[in-house]
Image (tube, rainbow, N blue to C red):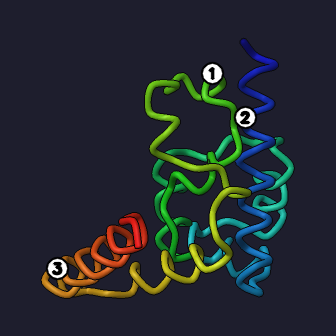
Amino acid sequence: MRTEAEAINRHIGDRLRILRKKRGLSQADLGAVLDVSFQQMGNYEKGKDRISAGALFMLARFLGTSPAAFFEGLAPAETGFAEDAADYPAASERPPQSDKLDAAFGRIRSQRDRALAVALVETIARRDESPA
């Protein structure tokens, strides 16, 4: 159990580092969000220290992504949510524009505008799924 938890902590740290670098941020930038040092952020990224659920949520919001982004790429058995695995494609299966879409959606404050954005994307997806 301990080794599995450590492997998951390392995976979350790897994902944190990838997401941080994709956005051109430093460890100090993320540390400021959590009020911790850049050294502590390094420990999180290396999987040496666990990140709390609250801290993951705050980081996800700051990075413009979902907390689920930190778990992308884990085998369903590792997360314990195998029945939901089909609903969450691995990062390698997602188009490169997904991160941009996630980030832009996270900046929309109006619930009405969010609903409109979801409706638009769902309409386009249905159109692409129908036979031509």
Label 3: state its secondary structure: helix
Alpha carbon distance from label 2 to label 3: 34 Å
Say which label, 2 or 3, has the lower sequence index: 2
Q: Are marks 1 and 2 in contact (CB under 8 Å)?
A: no
How packed is label 3: few (under 14 Cα within 10 Å), some, or many (20 or more)? few
Position of 46 compared to 132: left or right?
right
Percent across and percent down for residue 34 are 57, 66
Q: Nearer the viewer, mark 1 or mark 2?
A: 1
Residue at the location (78% across, 66% down)? 18
Three-letter residue code for mark 1: Ala
- In the displayed orientation, state which residue is furthest to the top: 1
Position of 76 compared to 42: left or right?
left
Say which label, 3 or 1, has the lower sequence index: 1
Say which label, 1 or 2, has the lower sequence index: 2
Q: Which residue is mark 1?
A: 77
Query: Of residues 76 and 130, which is closer to you in this image?
Result: 130
Q: Which residue is mark 3?
A: 111
Label 2: state its secondary structure: helix
Three-letter residue code for mark 2: Ile
Determine whether 113 is above or below 51 in the image.
below
Q: Quadrant of residue 52?
A: top right
